[in-house]
């Protein structure tokens, strides 16, 4: 997307889990277009200098990095008060990006406590932050985005809790669209298929990417910036009639990513080697 096409100057974008992976790329996409991005994190698993350098290299607005556990209401309130102290008077875009859950290896791993914890990190912040933003600033963000995945529809190894919590979040997107309709809020969930991030490696292991090379081309993977650009577009003002939707960013591959496609590629490979 041509960054000159959209101007977010004067806008504030709040992104949870914004210091790496999808969150970081989303912040960069908005900041390149003039937005002030607030990137939250729970732990210090990033290098602040590297992030500032990355934004500077792209001539993007320097972000605010803020430590805040999305499942801790006190952290949320403190974060928003700190932003008000910085003379920020409104949150224009809120991206609920954080997802955290235990990897499930067998049926005996299922516990209600584990499910609740997954929902508290992967689902509830979209609601809790939206409520807290209204309480702190007196208005809701114009645009609210939840980062989901194709997990609710497609099986992934150990992904049980994440998939369940993403499914709950997607249901709330539809209901929040109704509940906040009178406030002219646009809320959507953006799904993607596999994206090469540290979270992907942590969930599925280091061997998945090399294994996948045997069966799928590099185009199988969605790039973080591709998902980020989709979210920028949804907040551009040109897509305001799109709300309450679950949008899949996958280049249309969900239709043909199946056994038949693997078979077809193998047949082509055999012909090329003859």
Image (tube, rainbow, N blue to C red):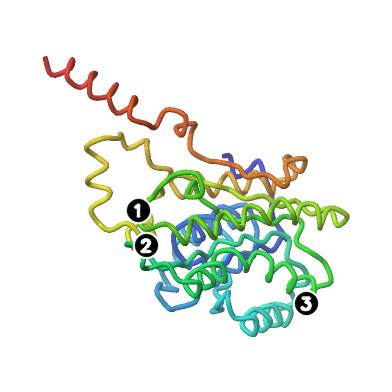
User: Distance between the Cα atoms at labels 3 and 1?
Assistant: 40 Å
- Residue at left offset 79%, top offset 64%: 140
Which of the pair 208/227 is nearer the observer? 208
Side (left or right) of 80 relative to 16: right
Of labels 3 and 2, earlier in sequence is 2
- Residue at left offset 62%, top offset 45%: 246
Q: Residues within 10 Å of mark 3 (few under 14, many from 20)?
A: some
| Residue under pointer 1 | 157
Q: Whole-percent x and y of residue 199? A: 39, 61
| Residue under pointer 3 | 136
The C terminus: image quadrant: top left
- Residue at left offset 59%, top offset 81%: 72
Work out which residue is located at the far right of the displayed protein and give it. 182
The disc at residue 107 is: 2
User: Distance between the Cα atoms at labels 1 and 2?
Assistant: 13 Å
Of labels 3 and 1, earlier in sequence is 3
Q: Whole-percent x and y of residue 45? A: 40, 74
* Secondary element type, mark 3: helix
């Amino acid at each position: 997307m041509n960054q000159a096409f959209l101007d977010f100057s004067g806008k504030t974008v709040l992104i949870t889990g914004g210091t790496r992976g999808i969150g970081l790329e989303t912040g960069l996409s908005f900041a390149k277009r003039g937005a002030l991005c607030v990137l939250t994190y729970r732990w210090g698993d990033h290098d602040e200098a590297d992030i500032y350098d990355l934004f500077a290299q792209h001539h993007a607005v320097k972000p605010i990095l803020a430590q805040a556990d999305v499942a801790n209401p006190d952290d949320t309130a403190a974060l928003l008060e700190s932003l008000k102290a910085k003379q920020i008077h409104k949150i224009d875009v809120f991206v609920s990006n954080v997802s955290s859950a235990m990897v499930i290896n067998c049926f005996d791993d299922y516990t209600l406590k584990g499910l609740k914890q997954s929902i508290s990190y992967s689902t509830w912040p979209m609601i809790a932050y939206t409520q807290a933003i209204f309480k702190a600033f007196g208005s809701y963000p114009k645009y609210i985005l939840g980062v989901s995945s194709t997990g609710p529809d497609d099986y992934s190894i150990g992904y049980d809790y994440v998939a369940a919590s993403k499914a709950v979040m997607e249901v709330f997107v539809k209901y929040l669209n109704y509940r906040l309709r009178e406030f002219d809020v646009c809320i959507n969930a953006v799904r993607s298929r596999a994206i090469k991030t540290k979270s992907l490696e942590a969930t599925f292991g280091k061997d998945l990417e090399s294994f996948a090379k045997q069966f799928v081309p590099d185009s199988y993977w969605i790039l973080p910036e591709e998902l980020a650009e989709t979210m920028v577009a949804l907040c551009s003002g040109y897509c305001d009639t799109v709300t309450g939707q679950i949008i899949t960013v996958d280049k249309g591959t969900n239709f043909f990513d199946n056994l038949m496609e693997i078979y077809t590629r193998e047949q082509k490979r055999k012909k090329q080697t003859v």
